């Protein structure tokens, strides 16, 4: 049997040769129950790097190579993908999965590769004093929870006491992340929190929505992903839950989630940390260099939608961090450690966003050694089913750092104690 | 010619009852051991350890465990994922509660805890059989996953319900945590696997194993000739769960490093390990290895071939991989319903007669 394994060994040994490009692996998922959300993100991520390669000849003259690896949102495949792309000289990982992120945090710390998890992953990684190699700006789950509650405060004249808020969440590390914050916030603002878990993959939610129909919460928040989102929105329509009282986190607010429910989904709200739609000037270049040149990733149906924009956002931040790293290092062929420096010293201004063809797309970010979490602000979008667009329903709302900062300090201190990590940046 | 009993004289009972009675087999076994211990550790890198060898070794332990219960004792179980979760959470609680005790002891203790849980869920097997028992163990699967999700004590009240393995060392070498070297990881799993496989082989050909097989073949007849169904079935559940618990502990602590119960130990894990033993061969030690190798290596091989070599799109390759692995399973089971172990047995029969089959 070992003989057959050596035969397999020979077959696999002929791996792709290492090239001198900048390698940014895309650990994507285009199959399984999370594919509807994984595909647009991966397409946006790939297309932005294709644009940089085609239009500017890469970053600082170095071409960017984006090897794609299918994880199916599965941690075992995630490990395989990490190990197989790591050897290629990967500079930064963006696995788009909180489960895989938890697994990779110790690994990237040992291997010295940056892990960039915008809007997902381990929230307390915002504390750069403990998490040297992990960055999760511009916003994290706890920011999201706080922004949602602040929005509800605004709607209720600053008072939520006596209200009942239900949290429908994916029963995994991802879905459980906001609970601690919401508990703190419920103590602070006097609302009652009802936790309603939905097990993977979330195709069956009759009992959860029956509970909501019975309990009649004033508001429902959702931390869902994949097929769970569309099912939840459909069930909410079925029980005639008022859609404008139903708020999803940024992972529960894409076109794929609301379109299946048709007209009924009109008025559904979602949090977002970047703009959406194809009206930004960068799409002109994308059309010229990528779409019309036949180099678009996937089937080309996603440009401009929410998750495509988010994939592009991640790619844009990574490319800007690489650029910053090149600037600091003084040469263009940067290694993983130099890219980390770029992430830590990233200063993304509105002027720079305008230069990139994305004016007003996102909040400015100024990272520091201690702050890997960014501004932590987001806005509320509302779905208009007739026009099939997400309309901005609030201005930028900044998270309640009074509640979040002690929580982040506590959770990161627990991680530091478990792993014997000394604080940096002192 | 080379592969025959003739000329290989046995002069003692010990010789006569050895595991590999044919010299060629024996030599081959020593050669495999020599390669596994003496060659691979020097050449293994992170990719080979984490994507190929460590999962293979760990799944082989789990498959051995399930094979003892299902293959040898005839009790169908769909609770494997749940029992692996027991092993994983037990080792996590032990590692964090007693950081100074050796990880090896923790892994074995985790197996012991799983054995106790296994016995508990094995009790219904005294009354129910076949499909009905499968449903009872399925309940164990769902109950255990729910329990580890629901009770925060099991995951030390972490915000996300994730468990993460801290670094633990043996003889100064890290075997869990992110700083573990590939050879350390591989050797730790290999040593446990070899010890457990050796134990399984010897259990199954002794009194205990014969009792299991008697119960499997016909429980009423076995009871009449004096086999106690209570102790036999429960011992099968205990020992099987011990193996599966050890596998779960290694799966979490050494292989994944962080896990959440629904994703890592869900129902699909139970099915995966059941497929391994069905494809490998029920009631066969070699079958457990062959099945684990098939189910672990085939997807990795196909992925490397389709994406790495042929440069296909990852989603197309992933879909095709499912179809190819599925088709291979069907073809295998049509060609040889008794699994790869039976193919191996037939090949050996043919080899004995070669080159003069008549």
Image (cartoon, helix red, strand yellow):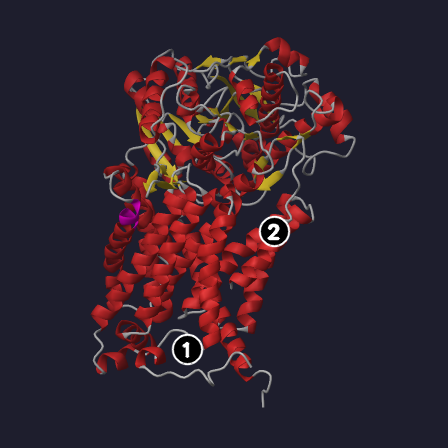
The residue stretch that appears in magenta: B103-107
Measured from the top left, where is residue B93 in percent x and y? 27, 41
Q: Is residue A109 left or right of residue A275?
A: left
Label pair 2/1, CB-CB below 8 angstroms: no
Please tell me which residue lies in front, B23 or A103.
B23
Q: Which label was assigned to residue A12? A: 2
Residue A120 seen: yes
Image quadrant of residue B70? bottom left
Residue corresponding to mark 1: B21
* Residue at x 52% of width, y 49% of height: B43
Q: Nearer the viewer, residue A47 or A64?
A: A64
Q: Is residue B39 magenta?
A: no
Using residue A263 as the reference point, say whether residue B122 is left or right of it. left
Quadrant holding the C terminus of chain B? bottom right
Chain letter, disc 1 residue: B
What is the chief secondary structure element of the magenta stretch?
helix
Q: How many marks?
A: 2
Comparing A211 with A403, the one in front is A403
Residue B130 spot, x, y in % from top left: 35, 69
Q: Quadrant of residue A416?
A: top left
Whether A177 is drawn above or below B188: the answer is above
* Whether residue B321 can be seen here: no
Q: CA distance from mark 2 to mark 1?
A: 35 Å
**Which element carries disc 2, helix, strand or loop?**
helix
Q: Residues within 10 Å of mark 2 (few under 14, many from 20)?
A: some
């Amino acid at each position: 049997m070992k003989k057959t394994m050596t035969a397999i060994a020979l077959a696999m040994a002929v791996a792709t040769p290492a090239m001198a490009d900048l390698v940014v692996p895309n650990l994507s998922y285009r199959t399984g129950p999370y594919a509807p959300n994984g595909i647009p993100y991966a397409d946006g991520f790939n297309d932005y790097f294709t644009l940089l390669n085609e239009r500017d000849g890469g970053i600082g003259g170095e071409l960017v190579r984006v090897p794609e690896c299918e994880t199916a949102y599965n941690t075992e495949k995630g490990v395989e993908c990490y190990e197989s792309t790591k050897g290629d000289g990967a500079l930064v990982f963006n696995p788009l999965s909180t489960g895989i992120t938890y697994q990779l945090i110790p690994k990237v710390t040992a291997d010295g590769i940056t892990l960039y998890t915008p809007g997902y992953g381990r929230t307390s990684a915002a504390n750069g004093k403990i998490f040297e190699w992990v960055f999760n700006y511009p916003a994290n789950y706890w920011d999201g929870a706080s922004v949602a509650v602040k929005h509800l405060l605004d709607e209720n004249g600053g008072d939520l006491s006596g209200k009942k808020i239900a949290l429908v969440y994916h029963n995994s590390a991802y879905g459980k992340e906001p609970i601690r914050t919401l508990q703190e916030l419920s103590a602070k603002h006097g609302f009652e929190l009802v936790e309603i878990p939905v097990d993977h993959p979330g195709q069956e939610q009759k009992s959860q929505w029956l509970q909501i129909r019975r309990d009649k919460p004033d508001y429902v928040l959702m931390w869902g992903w994949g097929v769970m989102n569309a099912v939840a929105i459909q069930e909410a329509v079925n029980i005639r839950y008022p859609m404008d009282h139903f708020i999803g986190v940024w992972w529960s607010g894409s076109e794929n989630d609301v379109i299946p429910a048709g007209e009924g989904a009109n008025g559904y709200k979602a949090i977002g940390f970047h703009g959406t739609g194809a009206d930004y000037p960068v799409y002109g270049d994308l059309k010229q260099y990528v779409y019309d040149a036949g180099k678009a990733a996937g089937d080309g149906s996603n440009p401009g939608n929410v998750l495509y924009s988010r994939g592009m956002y991640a790619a844009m931040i990574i490319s800007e961090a690489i650029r910053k790293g090149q600037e600091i290092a003084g040469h263009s062929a940067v290694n993983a450690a130099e890219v980390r420096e770029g992430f830590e010293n990233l200063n993304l201004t509105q002027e720079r966003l305008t230069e990139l063809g994305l004016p007003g797309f996102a909040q400015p970010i100024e990272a520091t050694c201690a702050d890997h979490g960014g501004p932590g602000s987001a806005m509320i979008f509302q779905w208009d089913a007739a026009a099939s667009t997400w309309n901005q329903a609030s201005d930028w709302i900044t998270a309640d750092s009074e509640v979040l900062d002690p929580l982040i300090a506590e959770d990161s201190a627990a991680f530091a104690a478990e792993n014997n990590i000394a604080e940096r940046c002192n | 010619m080379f592969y025959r009993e003739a000329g290989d004289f046995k002069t003692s009972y010990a010789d006569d009852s050895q595991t590999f009675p044919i010299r060629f087999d024996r030599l081959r076994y020593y050669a495999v051991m020599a390669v596994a211990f003496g060659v691979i550790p020097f050449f293994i890198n992170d990719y080979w350890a984490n994507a190929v060898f460590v999962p293979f070794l760990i799944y082989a332990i789990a498959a051995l465990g399930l094979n003892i219960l299902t293959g040898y004792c005839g009790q169908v179980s769909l609770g494997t994922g749940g029992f692996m979760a027991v092993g994983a959470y037990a080792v996590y609680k032990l590692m964090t509660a007693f950081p100074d005790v050796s990880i090896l002891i923790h892994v074995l203790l985790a197996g012991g805890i799983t054995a106790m849980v296994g016995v508990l869920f094995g009790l219904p097997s005294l009354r129910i059989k076949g499909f009905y028992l499968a449903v009872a163990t399925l309940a164990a699967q769902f109950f255990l996953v729910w329990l580890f999700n629901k009770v925060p004590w099991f995951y030390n009240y972490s915000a996300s319900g994730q468990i993460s393995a801290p670094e633990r060392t043996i003889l100064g070498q890290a075997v869990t945590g992110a700083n573990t070297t590939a050879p350390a990881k591989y050797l730790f799993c290999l040593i446990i696997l070899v010890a457990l496989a050796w134990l399984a082989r010897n259990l199954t050909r002794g009194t205990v194993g014969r009792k299991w097989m008697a119960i499997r073949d016909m429980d009423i007849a076995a009871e009449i000739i004096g086999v106690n169904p209570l102790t036999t079935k429960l011992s099968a559940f205990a020992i099987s769960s011990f193996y599966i618990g050890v596998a779960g502990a290694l799966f979490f602590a050494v292989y994944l490093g962080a896990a959440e119960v629904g994703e890592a130990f869900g129902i699909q894990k139970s099915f995966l390990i059941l497929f391994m033993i069905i494809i490998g061969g029920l009631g066969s030690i070699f079958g457990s290895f062959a099945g684990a190798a098939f189910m672990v290596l085939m997807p990795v091989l196909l992925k490397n071939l389709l994406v790495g070599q042929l440069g296909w799109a990852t989603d197309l390759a992933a879909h095709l991989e499912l179809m190819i692995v599925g088709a291979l399973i069907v073809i295998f089971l049509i060609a040889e319903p008794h699994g790869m172990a039976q193919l191996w047995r037939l090949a050996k029969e043919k080899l004995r007669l070669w080159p003069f089959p008549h």
